[in-house]
Image (cartoon, helix red, strand yellow):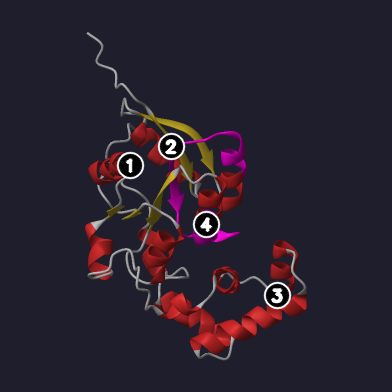
Amino acid sequence: MNLLPSETISILIVDDHALVRAGIARLLADEQDLRVIGEAGSGEEAIEFVRLNLPDIVLLDARMPGIGGIEATHRLRSLAPQIRIVAMSAVASGVIPSQMLRAGASAFITKSVEVDELLKAIRLVHTGQRYVTPEVATQLSTDPFNEKGGLLFDKLSRREMQIAQMLTDGKKVSQISAYLELSPKTVYSYRYRIFEKLGIRSDVELTILAVKHGLADDAREMDGLPRFDRIAG
């Protein structure tokens, strides 16, 4: 009797921490219906991978250097609308969950979930359903996919959000200019509009606000590694 699954779900793991990628890959290897076909350390690498290979599911870290998880989600969905994105983050609160879901992610889970919940999210998303880990759903109250908006950072455009993240990551205007292929004057213009929309006057205030709303790293993300209970020693 053939006990193998009739369909295998192909998965790309995207996280800027190699240990996290390796841990998740090891956990998924125990499941007969799941197959990890690649790993990427950034949104940019994920996009290049998807240009050549088409996974069913992308497990995507919401907080990464470079273009970041939100912009990567936008681009991946534009490049290959049929793929499903399961967003992951160390924190459940703040702007990141709603922004990732609105960018096109089909699910959002925290990295502290049990393995069974990760597997549940992957399989549900593969069938066309959406999933939000209960902790995140509670934070987002009665509008888990934030279709009505309403959060402070929702005032920012897609490009403004991208630049705001880069500023809070410590990037200088010259670096952002070169990376995004925009003139420094244009980046300064975006920076001014970001400050105006958020009611702030400096990069320091932006960083404080970003940490408060979960857009930037804080001490809580120190505990963001996935659980390795099922990884063989």
Contact, mark 3 vs mark 1 (Cβ under 8 Å): no
Quadrant of the frame with the N terminus: top left
Kind of residue indicated by mark 3: Val
Q: In this image, 170 relative to 84: left or right?
A: right
Q: In this image, 208 relative to 232: left or right?
A: right
For image coordinates 33% across by 42% down, the residue present is: 122
Residue bearing mark 3: 173
Indicate whether 149 appears above or below 118: below
Q: Tell us which disc is closer to us: 3 or 2.
A: 2
Give residue 56's mark: 2
Local SS, label 4: helix
Q: Residue furthest top?
A: 1
Q: CA distance from mark 3 to mark 2?
A: 37 Å
Residue 19 visible: yes
Q: Which is more toward the observer, 16 or 122?
A: 122
Q: CA distance from mark 1 to mark 4?
A: 19 Å
Residue bearing mark 4: 74
Examine the image and state in which quarter residue 66 appears.
bottom right
Q: Around disc 1, counting alpha carbons within 10 Å, would you say few (fewer than 14), some (14 to 19), or many (20 or more)? A: many
Residue bearing mark 1: 122
Contact, mark 3 vs mark 2 (Cβ under 8 Å): no
Q: CA distance from mark 1 to mark 2?
A: 10 Å
Q: Which is more toward the observer, 173 or 71?
A: 71
For image coordinates 69% across by 69% down, the residue present is: 176
Indicate whether 105 appears above or below 153: above
Local SS, label 2: loop
Give residue 23's mark: none
Q: Position of residue 124 (x, y in %)?
A: 28, 43
Lower position in the chain sequence, tag 3 or tag 2? 2
